[in-house]
Structure formats: C-alpha cells, structure tokens
Amino acid sequence: MLQTIAERLRQQYRTVPYPSAHPVLSERFMGRPHINAHTCTANAGCTACMEVCPTQALALQEGTLGLDMGRCTFCGKCAKACPQSALTFTKEYRLASSTRQGLWVFPSPEPADAPVPSQVQPFDHPMLPSLRRSCRLREVSAAGCNACEADCNVLGTIVFDLPRFGIDYVASPRHADGLLITGPLPRNMQLATQKCYTAVTPPKLVMAVGACAISGGLFSGLEAEGEGAPAHLTVNLFIPGCPPHPYTILDGMLRFLGKQVP
Amino acid sequence: MANHITLMNGTSVPVHSIPSLGIGEFSQWLTDELHNRARVCAFFAGPQENDSQNNRTSRMLYAVLARDAENSLAVAATPAPQAYPAFTPAMPALHLFERELYEETGIEPTGHPWLKPVRFPATPHGPAIGIADFFTVTGEDVHEVAVGPIHAGIIECGHFRFQCQGEVVMHLEISLGYHHRGIEKALQGGPTKRTLPFMETLAGDTTIGHSWAYSTIIEALAHLPVAPRGQALRAVALELERLANHTGDLGALAGDIGYLPTSAFCGRLRGDFLNITALLCGNRFGRNLVCPGGTAVAADAALCRTMVERLHLAAKDVEGAANLMWRTGSVLSRMMGIGTVPEKAARDLGLVGPAARASGLPCDARSTHPLPGMRGHDLHTHTLQAGDVFARATMRHKEIQESVAFITRMLQSLPEGEVYSHPTPGCSNTPPLAPHTLAVALVEGWRGEVCHVAMTGAQGNFARYKVMDPSFHNWIGLAMALRGQQISDFPLCNKSFNLSYCGHDL
Ligand code: SF4
C-alpha cells in the first residue's frame, strides 16, 4: 500500500494539459499536407507525386491536383518525389471532417503555416446537448491492423483520460450512441458490423477512423472487398490518418460534440 | 544427394537447387527433423509453375525448417499430390499449415484431425465466415459459451467457443478469418509501390518486425548490401516495438486482475515508447522507417542522445510499475499456476516467442539466426519453466530489461556512415530481383518469430510470397492454456499471449 503511494508520487500526475494547451508532437510528425498553388505544375502535366503514391490518394480534379486525406497514409513519398517541393506536410494535426469531400486538400496560394478552417461541424441532431455530456461509443475493429485500434485505446489511458470529456467506449452496442469503426470493413466483417449497427441505440452516429475505415485505404481494390465504412453505413465523422494521431481523433470527437478545443 | 538444402537466415538459394523428394521421403525427412533437431517455420504450396527448364509443370510443396542449434535453415520440396496422408497426427506443429494448404489449394491432407477453414477467403465454393463444424461436448452440466467476432473491448475480431462443464473449460476453439484482407494474394507479382506499405500493416503493432523481414528478403534477392548504420537503427526500432507492446501487455494483465496502479502506469508508458519511435520516423508505429537497403530515416548524435534519455526515463517507471505488481500477493496468486502450457506441448505445437520461452524453449531468432550484420549483437535469451501466465508475464519484464540495455548499447555506438545502401533514398524503386530464387527471412518480433519466404518467377517478381506472423504458430497455445481452467481465467490467459488477429488472417 505505502509502496503504491510512493510510486504514484514518484511517477506524478500525467494527464496532459490539453485542451487548455496545444499538444506536443514529434519533430518529424506528418500532419496536414499543403500544396503550393504557385509552384505546383500538376496542371501543366507533372505527375511525379501521383506516380509514387501507394494508395491513389492524389488525383487531378478538373485540371488541378487534389490530395484525398481519406486515402492518404501520410507516408510522405509524394513530398519527396515533388520536383518543385510544392507538396509539403505541415505539423497540423486537426484533420477531421464532417464530410467526405472535406478531406480533400487542393493547391493553396496561402503559406503552408496559414491556419485552415476546420471541416468539422457540430453534430446536427436534437440530441447534441445530451451527447455533449455523455457520448458512448462501441468500437468495431473491422479488420484494422491494430494501429488505429491502439490509438483509439490510448485515449482511454491516464494520459488523455477520455472520460473527462464525457466520452466512453462501451462493451455493448446496446449501451452505445454510435459506432467508431476502424479497418477496411472487408466481406468477412460486414455481417457482424451490420448486426452491431442494428443494435446501437439512436442517434446511431458513425465515426470512421483511419484511411481504411474511410476508403479501404491500402486495402481498397483487393479481393476481400474492404472499401471502408461509407460503402455500408452513413458516416457522420471522418478522421483521417494511418493511423490518425490520438490528438487528431480527440480533436475530431470534441469538435463533433461542439466542445472547446485549442 | 542430400534430401534438403541448408541456408542461413537472410539469404537465398536458386529454386532448382532445392531437392525434390517423393512424398514418402519428404514425410520421413520432416519427421526426422522435427523430432530430432528442427522446428517448422513454413510449410506451403509454391506457385503453380510451368517451368520447362526445370521440368516442373505443377506445384511443389515446400517446407522451411529452423535448426536452432546449428544456426541454419533447411528447405526441401515435394511435388504436390492431390491428397496425401496428413502430417499433423505425427507432427502437430503442422496442423494449421495443413489446414491453410487445403483451404488455399484443395490439396487434401487426409486424416487431418480437424480440417476446418482458417481464413474463410472469398471463394465460390468455400463456406461463409463463421460457418464451421465446431467441436461440441455433450453430457450433463455441459454448456457452451460463444464470444465474438466483435469483442467487448477495443480489440480485433475473432470467434471463440468455450466448451464448459460448470466453470471449467474443457476446450476452447478459436475460429478466425474476420481480418482477412487478402494481402498475400495481392503481394504476388510484386514488388510494387504498395508492397512495403502492405508489410507495414500486416500487423500494425509489428510494423518493424514485418518490414524488416521484407527488406531482408529484397536484400537477399537483389544482392543488395544493407547499410550497417541502417541495420543497427532497425534493431533499435525492433526493440522499441517490443518495449511498447510488452509494457502495454503488463499493464493489460494488471488491468484484468483489477490491479489498477500498474495498469494505469503502463498504459502511459506504452505510449512513451511509441513516442520514442515517432522521434525517429514521425510515426508512433514505425511506419516509413525500414526500407530495403537500410532505413528511410537518419539519426544524428543529438537525436540518439535524446532517445536514450527518454528511454531511461520510461524504463525507470516501467521498473517501478512492474515491481509493484510482483510485490502484491493477490496479483501473484491470480497469475501463478494459471494457463499452463507444458514444455512438451509447446515444443510439439511449435510455439514461438516469449510464450515458448516461458515454457522452457530457448527459441529466439535474434540469437540463433542473426540477420546479416547482427552477429555479435545478441540479447540474452531468458527461459522459464513454469509455462503459466506468471511465467509469460515475468518473461515480458525480463525482455524489457534486455531491450533497454540493448538499445542503449546500440545508440551509443551506431556504426558511422549512411543509413541506406540503395541509390534512391526511401527506396521507392525496388532493385531487380534474381529470378527463380527462394529467400527466407526470420525476425524475432515482440510476439515471436516473424518469417517471410519469397519465391521469384522468371521475371524476378514474386511468384509466391508467404508470411508467417508468430500468431500463426501461437493461437493453438492459447487454446491449450485454457484447458481445465476456469472460464474467468480467459482474459488473463489471452493477454499473456496477446496474439494478432490480422497477422494471422492476413
Ligand atoms: S503521403 Fe499520402 S498522398 Fe503522398 S504518396 Fe503517401 S499516401 Fe500518397
């Protein structure tokens, strides 16, 4: 008993000051991509970035280059391949979006460190005031690789202490307000996920966390038919990354519930 | 003529140099090896070939065995028959390999005691996921508990059936396949720009283990030397992966017992180790770190110093957290004598990694099959005899201590020079691979031996790429551990193994 207390005193209080302070991320963290509109020559035929991308996240849309964060694994190969250094990755971790379209990044005339407005709208539902106080989620690992799962799990540790925001992961879908889906949702997980969704109580919100859950990510186009959650369910919140940083997930959830974030 | 060919870990041999034995001779060779000196790393069907040069028109079956005492691997082949007498009754370690073979090719190991689906892949005639001939027990007071595929926590999906009498579990059947993404098939014809990312996500908690094994395969097939500094950084990253997961598992075990101090401390500390990996490559799980030829990221002296400092801070707290648990009688009594896998069962079933070592088997590829350039950088291989949850838990703690010392040694004396040997940094273009060649790579990941076997075709692309995550060997170990235990012991037994579903399902 005394040893436990002594160890607790030695290891100190470790919950992060977030949301009253910005998180500290690693120097090499790869956040929101930025495409420099002044230097990108994709509209003039350059395809260097598209050629190296493993997930076809880069595509021309009406002549301009677009980067779909819903497919991107943030591997950085495109940035290395760009002959103009027009494509860079910023330290911006706030990437979530209420819409699929909001995950696209297009060339911008602004500098890379200029603030970008959040794409998350607070959940448009009469239950929002009560969800803000208590939101319970059932996590479904729909063939995730266990990295997204780990970064959802870590939010429950003393470091992030998710319950202090009124958000909890629960064991049964019947106790849940919604699903948090990770993984590409291939054929072998579709029935189980559908059953789980049926058992969730209204408002049955759905969060897709990670490139796989959003679009199938790396596994899109494979024989197992894992094309992500939107192919089967209406998704209310998209949190991109491979896996998303825990702060990216937390920021997305808090904005979605209309809470204060840095 | 010898009935097999030997090679070292991380090397390759021409496919035509692998002796082809008759099925009877092959069976005899396997039996002799497995009963006397070797363990099975891989057993699989090669590509469907039409190779006029070697006069082989059909498939071959290949077995890759590890002879730990001799630090070598032995490979032999046999022309694939339509059916053959199953090896499993005499060599249980092959039970899942034979089921996999049957599921993938229809080649039938007749007399296999439980020839059930493994991954339920998308085939026109195969059963839908979850439809299997499950074991049942009948009689008075007997009942069945079915769990999953979706579990109560944030964990991967799988289906468990417990056959119980009262509280006692007579048998646990584990039926997986829910995480099947079809990666192995997608690897055929590669390497492509998706190959390395696939390797990094085969099992997202073993990114370094699998990406290192893959890079070793490419190095062996392309005769690409690995940069010594890069190799050393990979070894550091591998141990960081081990530290994060072992620490997390100690915490999870404490959590399942209801001993919250260690659970809370380790939950944080696991993240501290992941963040050290992120210092190196920007990603907490070691993505974009390993690439053929070395590593895609460099580390200067200042970064190495920071990493060592952060490592020691975290390591000190892990010691504190773990020792609290070992000093608490109620925790120890919950772990001791629970979920025992005896040494003989562990050997017969071919268990690997900390689970095998906790049952007394000294198998650790880092010592017995060092990768090129890693000889002399051994870590001490601990073994324990008890084979219970307590042994698997203390094994994690001992390995944490070894890893911390190892990383410190490595980071304080990294070889000078570049981190990659490949002309294009980050290695987006894979160098040409030798045609008609087989390469093997073993990496001792945190769960145990990660084994990759690649065979190239005439153009030097992958005709077959076989991945064995350690979980493939060890799931049966968990089922055995549950025999005769209380059903309430399951969470503890499960956490003490902490196996991968996606690494098994691929
Ligand atoms: S960072 Fe994203 S967009 Fe760029 S190459 Fe990698 S996956 Fe493609």
Image (cartoon, coloured by chain):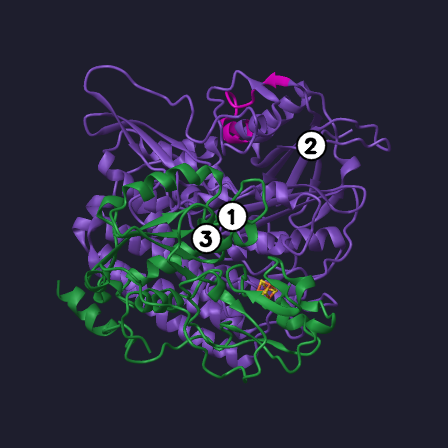
Horizontal side of B334 relative to B22 (left or right) equals left
| Picture coordinates of residue B352, whole percent (x, y) | 47, 42
Q: Mark 3 belongs to which subunit?
A: A
Q: Residue at x 66, y 81 (%)?
A: A39
User: Mark 3: which amino acid?
Assistant: Ala
Q: Mark 1 belongs to which subunit?
A: A
Q: Are marks 3 and 2 in contact (CB under 8 Å)?
A: no
How would you rate the neighbour count of disc 2 (Cα within 10 Å): few for under 14, some for 14-19, many for 20 or more?
many
Q: Colour of chain A?
A: green
Asked whether residue B366 is in view, the answer is yes
Q: Residue B440, relative to residue B410: is it above or below?
A: above
Separation of residues labelled 1 and 2 (CA atoms): 39 Å
On the same chain: label 1 and label 2? no
Secondary element under disc 3, as helix, strand or loop, is helix
| Picture coordinates of residue B258, whole percent (x, y) | 19, 51
Separation of residues labelled 3 and 1 (CA atoms): 8 Å
Label 3 or label 2, whichever lies nearer to me, is 3
Secondary element under disc 1, as helix, strand or loop, is loop
- The magenta-colored residue range is B83-98
Residue designated by label 3: A213
Residue designated by label 2: B76
Residue designated by label 1: A227
Quadrant where the N terminus of chain B sits is top right
User: Mark 2: which amino acid?
Assistant: Ala
Q: Tell me, yes or no, whether the highlighted magenta stretch contains residue B275.
A: no
Separation of residues labelled 3 and 2 (CA atoms): 42 Å
| Picture coordinates of residue B468, whole percent (x, y) | 55, 42
Label 1 or label 2, whichever lies nearer to me, is 1
Secondary element under disc 2, as helix, strand or loop, is strand
Q: Tell me, yes or no, whether the highlighted magenta stretch contains residue B92.
A: yes
